[in-house]
Amino acid sequence: MRIEKDPNTAYWERALGIWDKVHPSIRTACSPRVVRRASLSCALVPSRHPSPWRGTNMQTMAAGVGLGVGIPASFSNLKKMDAMPASLRGGPGNELFKLVSTGKKKVVKGVRVSGARSMAPEIAEMERASQGSPLFVPRQKYCEAIHKTIRRKTCTVMIGNVAVGSEHPIRVQTMTTTDTKDVAATVDQVMRIADRGCDIVRITVQGKKEADSCYEIKNTLVKKGYNIPLVADIHFAPSVALRVAECFDKIRINPGNFADRRAQFEKLEYTEADYQEELEHIEQVFTPLVEKCKKYGRAMRIGTNHGSLSDRIMSYYGDSPRGMVESAFEYARIARKLDYHNFLFSMKASNPVVMVQAYRLLAAEMYVHGWDYPLHLGVTEAGEGEDGRMKSAIGIGALLQDGLGDTVRVSLTEAPEYEIDPCTRLANLGMKSAAQQRGVAPFEDKHRRYFEFQRRTGTLPAQKEGDSVDYRGVLHRDGSVLMSVSLEQLKNPEALYRALACKLIIGMPYKDLATVDTIFLRELPPVADKNATLAVKRLADISVGVLTPLSEQLAKPLPNAMVLLTLEEAAKSLDKVPARTRYAVTLRGDEPYEELEILKTLDATMLLVYMPEDEETSSRVHASRRLFEYLESNNISFPVIHHLNFPAGTDRDDLVIKAGSEAGALLVDGLGDGVMLEAADQEFDFLRSTAFGMLQGCRMRNTKTEYVSCPSCGRTLFDLQEISAEIREKTSHLPGVSIAIMGCIVNGPGEMADADFGYVGGAPDKIDLYVGKDVVQRGIPMSTATDALIQLIKDNGRWVEPEAVEA
């Protein structure tokens, strides 16, 4: 189905069309305001009006059931009655559209797009509002192409002497961690950062004293020959922003707390007048900064944080990507009204899944409005080490693969100089992908959900009559890890069991929480090698899968091993697979559809998607998307494992960045059931932990303690790196537990929405402890705060003692 659309008319038509389907008893109970405020995008009943149906999805209300799935489409300009086309104000009985039958398709005629920069009417693909829904909605564009990487076209924003936008390289930036009032230390750190190749540096400016120091910082750097653009990070302080705009090159504001008070997470009810009054207050507070930035030629970033949305936004949109976008758009509309366009957006969250959805939704909304502002990408509070780099690679890399992003920051709980390297690697990856425009032939992407996480779960292996081992454990329901094992490793079984993260009891292996699910033996041991054969048998006995190429199994039969077939072998040599032997199939994903037809006839245990690292034309991400679309369209439910094999000499950080950007970019969309990483010269433990870290970063399989750890800045009230290391040392054995370690609370307790417990700087040498978003203890001396955190975890029944490791 296709629709010739006008968003303003189409939005209201759909909202009222949904309303017609709502059960009469529910319609009677709801206020008319519920109808006219029904956003096309999400159809959420706004919570700023009293209603028993607050937060309920309207198309779900039509079926008379509970919460439903949000619909991806534009949502701006739906708060006011005057946004509703005149033809709709008479109620849902009016005839709005003329349906024209064109074979199997229907065309709906509409009018123009609303917005400051109008777009010509266009033909939009339609999709079901949610799985199984009878309602069709526009399938909204969020990037230039879904079959290859094409960089999104943007305007150019000048930040000092650095140009940001699609016509320029992807810029790298970081943030200082010094006390801004310490001019010498801040200048020294900025110079070290600049010498590492950073393009832009952000500095926290929380008060008048810090703002005064900014003049001296800027002048000192210029005298030393450093003209790197400086950005003032502003929270809660419009007057400070006005002052520092006279000397710094860019102002970053947080729309959640620039003019609004800090969110209290109260269930507030807003009348129409209340809501409008707050918007007018925002305009009154924000306008002087916009005018000053125009006067001095300063840039601005309207940077939403998932954790610091205002009560007003929270009460209307909830703690959601949609709320993040609307929060930023409120400020952008004011800037545009004042003819100020030297700004860009960011949508940061500590959860890569939320972050990706928010940026896509932002880009989609800009496409609807015809806006072309650049994007600053980042996963906030990513943490440290490989986990922090992996989270950032998943979120930032996924967007870069779609051509989104013009400047990046990797937020690590490390010295800012160490952020530059992963930033540069990601920026280079994004530039290379866009320059090469690798991909696949165009295809219809009808099943992937762009703005919400909806995992495609493959059918896991079932036990069959006559099986001598339990095959149900060769894949894990929350995400699987496969590892390649060599013949050399088989010579030392106990070391192998430990490397696979098995639990050892008197030398015998048992599966544990983070045990590898299946091993891949490229080469089988000789049949006469009883020790190696026994080592493999013991793994099979505890439901660790054993996978080997068909040629190896035919030459050196190994009991209970699964065989790996190429797609060609599956088509031509399936009869060579020994009876009752399970098999997997490896393929690229970009094969002609006629070659993929064989998949309809197979009974495979899993598919392995493998694209050589030196591939010059196809892209792993786009080929895999194409494959998943084919599988879904043909109701093929094999589990899919992303197989990456890195060549010798691959740098460890490159491996993490590339794996997260490619396999992670698919898993964050719910496309895939696991991962296998190979690299000839990398340590086995590193590859295994990286694979499990990717699954956890994509919010799939949780096998270790999750940390939400801020990168530190001038606001930090304690040594974040030292305390973070101390807490990790004492709590790293708590899989399923999430701990937020925050230098201050400026980003809001909402940033800890995914965390079970929070350790937050409340005052110098004082710590506040949280359970979820609620503070439960205040002003704890830092010397005892870690012990108090552990006791809090115990009091909430989440503590377990570390297990003794068998020698």
Image (cartoon, rainbow, N blue to C red):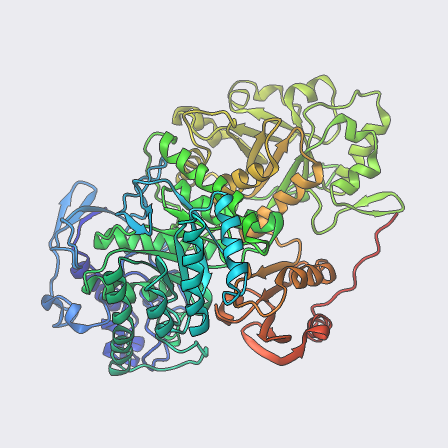
Front residue of this view, candidates 220 and 355: 220
Residue drawn at (50%, 47%) of the image: 394
Front residue of this view, candidates 320 and 13: 320
Q: Is residue 739 positioned above or below 514 on the image?
A: below
Horizontal relation, residue 760 to residue 559: left or right: left
Horizontal relation, residue 528 to residue 335: left or right: right
Q: Position of residue 267 (x, y in %)?
A: 42, 80
Q: Position of residue 492 (x, y in %)?
A: 83, 33
Horizontal relation, residue 793 to residue 376: left or right: right
Q: Position of residue 629 (x, y in %)?
A: 40, 39
Is any part of residue 348 visible from this angle? no
Is any part of residue 801 visible from this angle? yes
Residue drawn at (34%, 55%) of the image: 361
Front residue of this view, candidates 364 and 44: 364
Q: Is residue 150 positioned above or below 259 on the image?
A: above
Residue drawn at (48%, 28%) of the image: 588
